[in-house]
Amino acid sequence: MNIAVIGTGYVGLVSGVCYAELGHDVYCVDKDPAKVELLQGGEVPIYEPGLQPLMRSNADAGRLKFTTDTATAIAGAEVVIIAVGTPPLPNGEADMQYIEVAAKEIGEAMNGYKVICVKSTVPVGTNERVRAIIADYYKGSFDNASVPEFLREGTAVQDTMNPDRVVFGTESKHAASLLTELHAPLTKEIVVTDIRSAEMIKYASNAFLATKISFINEIANICEKVGADVSEVAKGMGYDRRIGASFLRAGIGYGGSCFPKDTKALIQIAGNVAYDFKLLKAVVEVNQHQRYGVLDKLFNALGTLKGKTIAVWGLAFKPETDDVRESPALEIVDRLIALGAVPKVYDPVALESFRKVYDDPAMMWCQSAQEAIQGSDALCLLTEWKEFVEFDLAAIEAALANPILIDGRNVYSYEAVKGTGLSYYPVGRPVHHIEREYVHG
Ligand SMILES: NC(=O)C1=CN([C@@H]2O[C@H](COP(=O)(O)OP(=O)(O)OC[C@H]3O[C@@H](n4cnc5c(N)ncnc54)[C@H](O)[C@@H]3O)[C@@H](O)[C@H]2O)C=CC1
Ligand SMILES: O=C(O)[C@H]1O[C@H](OP(=O)(O)OP(=O)(O)OC[C@H]2O[C@@H](n3ccc(=O)[nH]c3=O)[C@H](O)[C@@H]2O)[C@H](O)[C@@H](O)[C@@H]1O
């Protein structure tokens, strides 16, 4: 099959590479010439495990090409997949400007029948709008489909090649059979539905996962007050197949380019039809508040943050990505500085992407985990990178001026911590406190 993918971000690039891996001929377009030049040279502009070798092998096999010109990419395509960004507007609504431009460019370049798919996460009704824009420019026949994407960053290739399900919404039998043929090698679980329901499935799925996270975070906050351990609670809940074990890891709240944006967008979508989505509003509020738990624990441990150097391990919103969009670390570092502390930050891959969106003369940028903890007054672990999980706890204790470990992701076990002199503050689990005189100043 000949496929064109519009937008080579996290979703478009991974999708394009994986469709090529299935043996299809894929032409990817991006408006950003620097990105396209990098891709044409065999370089991947994002950190995503497994993506680069797969991209190079498919490009070398002649199945994967890149261009900045939409007309070139779609000329021979039977299926056109729109995967441009839909970032949040200040009021929470999804910004449709990139979708509108992409639709116009496709409309202008149409040269025959094609199936136009929207993979970006878009409000209900967007596929109809895309159809109308294309129809303004192209009077021939074409079909539409909503093909929402469910991949996660950090495991994007694996998620795309082995999805739990593929969903598409279309009114066209021909489009349905073409898309079924395209996705059948990936999964047996193919849900074919109407366009509006497919658009809603995407928002409802992300909102539900975000709800699970805020739910377990609230349980964690109660656990802290009643002396229970949220890890044990989640384990005990997760064996119930109606609940499921996944997405019950308590921590510092969800971040990333999607949960924060999509929950707010769904609240707006509901609001636009005069529906007050109270539950989801609470999910967002709980998530916002959860970030401050780290700061409360630092206060409890140190009394004041003024003049303290605080090691921060992890800036990405999750491990195995360089993405810092809506990362809880952004707000935590900002607060630390506002409270007079000096954050010594380190992340194995996200230092540069963090520096592009947040920089402050009060910060110390560290080139290793060890450098960040050396002589610091406390350590906050914000992203559960393997490097941090495997770090020797005795070495953490030895390096810190005050051996205080705030574990925002619950990665260490009490057994391991008990063998050290660390005061350990996890999330939703009892504190392991060692009485001692702290170094001040
Ligand atoms: N990042 C993720 O993990 C997931 C994202 N999504 C959704 O997929 C969509 C894309 O997200 P990302 O890939 O993260 O975005 P991104 O911001 O990483 O990439 C979007 C790309 O589209 C390009 N672009 C914009 N307008 C264009 C045009 N007219 N023609 C060609 N290229 C154009 C931009 O230059 C950029 O490279 C969003 O709606 C997002 O909500 C869905 C599932 C997972
Ligand atoms: O629409 C999207 O963009 C994507 O959003 C999420 O994927 P992603 O944001 O890449 O990463 P997740 O693994 O879902 O993690 C999101 C955030 O939730 C946090 N999280 C996750 C799970 C958990 O149990 N606890 C928890 O705090 C993570 O630390 C992270 O900050 C969804 O999992 C994907 O299915 C969806 O396609």
Image (cartoon, grey):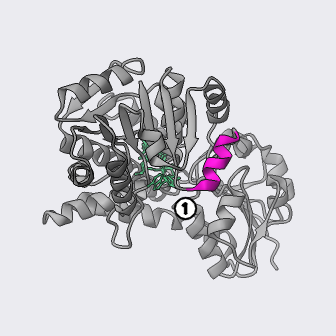
Viewer can see residue 8: yes
Q: From the top left corner, tell me how far across and down residue 257 is, in percent.
A: 48, 55
- Nearer to us in this view, 81 or 113: 113
Q: Which residues are magenta?
A: 32-41
- Nearer to us in this view, 307 or 254: 254
Q: From the top left corner, tell me how far across and down residue 220 is, in percent.
A: 45, 53
**How many numbered circles does the render carry?**
1
Q: Tell whether circle 1 marks a residue whose Cβ is less than 8 angstroms from ligand 2.
A: yes
Residue for point 54% across, 32% down: 17
- Report the side of 367 relative to 8 (left or right): right
Q: From the top left corner, tell me how far across and down residue 183 is, in percent.
A: 37, 24
The residue labelled by disc 1 is 328
Figure check: 58 above or below 322: above
- Report the side of 395 relative to 284 (left or right): right
In the picture, residue 319 is in which quadrant?
A: top right
Q: From the top left corner, tell me how far across and down residue 3 is, in percent.
A: 43, 32
Query: Which residue sits furthest left?
Result: 274
In the picture, residue 62 is in which quadrant?
A: top right
Viewer can see residue 247: no
In the picture, residue 101 is in which quadrant?
A: bottom left
Figure check: 226 above or below 415: below
- Report the side of 395 relative to 140 (left or right): right
- Nearer to us in this view, 2 or 14: 2
Magenta stretch: residue 7 in it?
no
Our reading of the magenta stretch's main secondary structure is: helix
Q: In what element is the residue under mark 1?
A: helix
